[in-house]
Image (cartoon, helix red, strand yellow):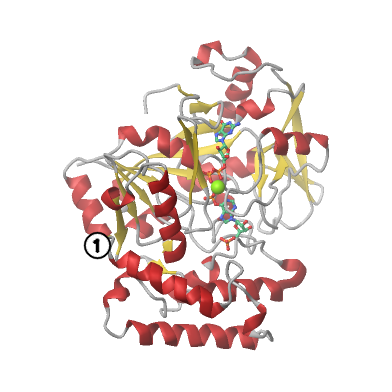
Amino acid sequence: MSKIDVLLGLQWGDEGKGKVVDVLAPRYDIIARFQGGPNAGHTLEFEGIKHVLHIIPSGICHRDKINVIGNGVLVEPVILRKEFAALESIGFEPRTNLYISRKAHLILPTHRLLDAANEASKAERKIGSTLKGIGPAYTDKVARVGVRVGDIARSDFKAVYEKAKESHLNLIRSLGYDVDAFRVEDKTLSEYERQWFEALDFLKGLKVIDSEYYLNEALDKGLKILAEGAQGSMLDIDFGSYPFVTSSNTITAGVCSGLGIAPSRVGKVFGICKAYCTRVGSGPFPTELFDADGEELRQKGREFGSTTGRPRRCGWLDIPALRYACMLNGVTHLMLMKIDVMNGFSRIKVCDSYEINGKRTMNVPYDMEESISPLYSDYDGWLQDVGGVGDYEALPQRMKDYIAMIEQKTGLPVALVSTSPDRKDTIIRTEL
Ligand code: GDP
Ligand code: IMO
Ligand code: MG
């Protein structure tokens, strides 16, 4: 009997999860997404191809691997169909190796309108949502009025749809907005609905399964499964910087409910983090930089959203937040991404603790919006290009010192170091 390994982000998302799933996929039989939806943007780069995935797991470019969209994921049919087309245009056939859970919830066009209306109503307290309908669709799921992929087969589906739509439109009106004030992807509601129903027909032709049985039976047979997270631990609905979070459990616990896997069947937990921090959207970010260093991280790291194109906010590595995420997830291996982005820095800062109301603490506070002063240590940069270095020992000593410092402060091994967006520039240090 095998256990399921987990790969997830430890910061505010965009840590490089897509790249690492693609790198590790050859070691697994099945890759399964357990939460989130099209708010995610996971980038793969290989053989001159750059490809961004949203709902489809990042193992899809390995033809012999099965990819599963789990029950905890939200499916937006139009976006899913576009992802199929994009994959087909570069020679892949997701029809053959993608399965979708019957219990996954659907994002309706009006969920997306409602997302926009909710954001508009928050004025300067906007979450900075990706406007893919995530919050409203998960709200319906928890309120027990959601629409699931399996419902598409119901003879009364249209009535179920209309009922949900009407309640969303009423909610928008109750916020004081005219429904026509909002668009989905620049389309009116009726234009987008037409596209959505066409995409729903397309979805009917895909492999829809009872994924909890499929995955548990696969483990019974000794197959190897990698669970792929979306977003990051600091965006978790319970433990992130609430209310500036997403609407799902992004942490390891989400694997159990999002795939139907018992906690005793969880194996290794790979925690992905950047050598610095980024955040896209609003909300507290203690180590955020507003100076030339922040701009250098953004430019060198190409820190612009994979889903929305928005510039990402950049800052130094935040150890208290990282330790918090490692604790919540039971991380067994750290994977350090984008260290090459810091090649040009002569001095690098790392936040070791916070000062809050004159008191020093290593803990992430209940209210991250209160005034947090990060307390920093300084390190010498390595001022060397590391592109193409495949051997850990051949990395600059100061870079290795930086990595050792992270291991010491988190008490965890850095098992993988990534030095470029490309699949091939990945150093795996320890047997995983
Ligand atoms: P994800 O959401 O966690 O999958 O991450 P994204 O794909 O949204 O953002 C990560 C970005 O960094 C993508 O553009 C990747 O191609 C890129 N990337 C990943 N690893 C590295 C790395 O080690 N170095 C550099 N320079 N870029 C990387
Ligand atoms: P990946 O998987 C970074 C952020 C949004 C916003 C907040 C809520 O690529 O790492 P939502 O659309 O979920 O209602 O937005 O969460 N956010 C992400 N930030 N990476 C992501 O996914 C994100 N998914 C959502 O910017 O602040
Ligand atoms: Mg991303």
Residue 58 falls in which quadrant of the image? top left
Q: Residue furthest front?
A: 89
x and y percentages locating residue 195 in the rendered image = 46, 71
In which quadrant of this rendering is ligand 2 seen?
bottom right
Q: Residue furthest left?
A: 221
**Left or right of residue 302: residue 224:** left
**Left or right of residue 106: residue 378:** right
Image quadrant where one finds the C terminus: top left
Q: Is residue 338 visible?
A: yes
Residue 244 falls in which quadrant of the image? bottom right
Image quadrant where one finds the N terminus: top left
In this orientation, which residue lies closer to the viewer: 180 or 99? 180
| Residue at image point 66% right, 71% down | 119
- The residue labelled by disc 1 is 210
Asked if residue 160 is positioned above or below residue 285 in the image, the reply reads below
In this orientation, which residue lies closer to the viewer: 359 or 205? 205
Asked if residue 379 is positioned above or below residue 235 in the image, the reply reads above
x and y percentages locating residue 167 in the rendered image = 51, 86
x and y percentages locating residue 127 in the rendered image = 66, 63
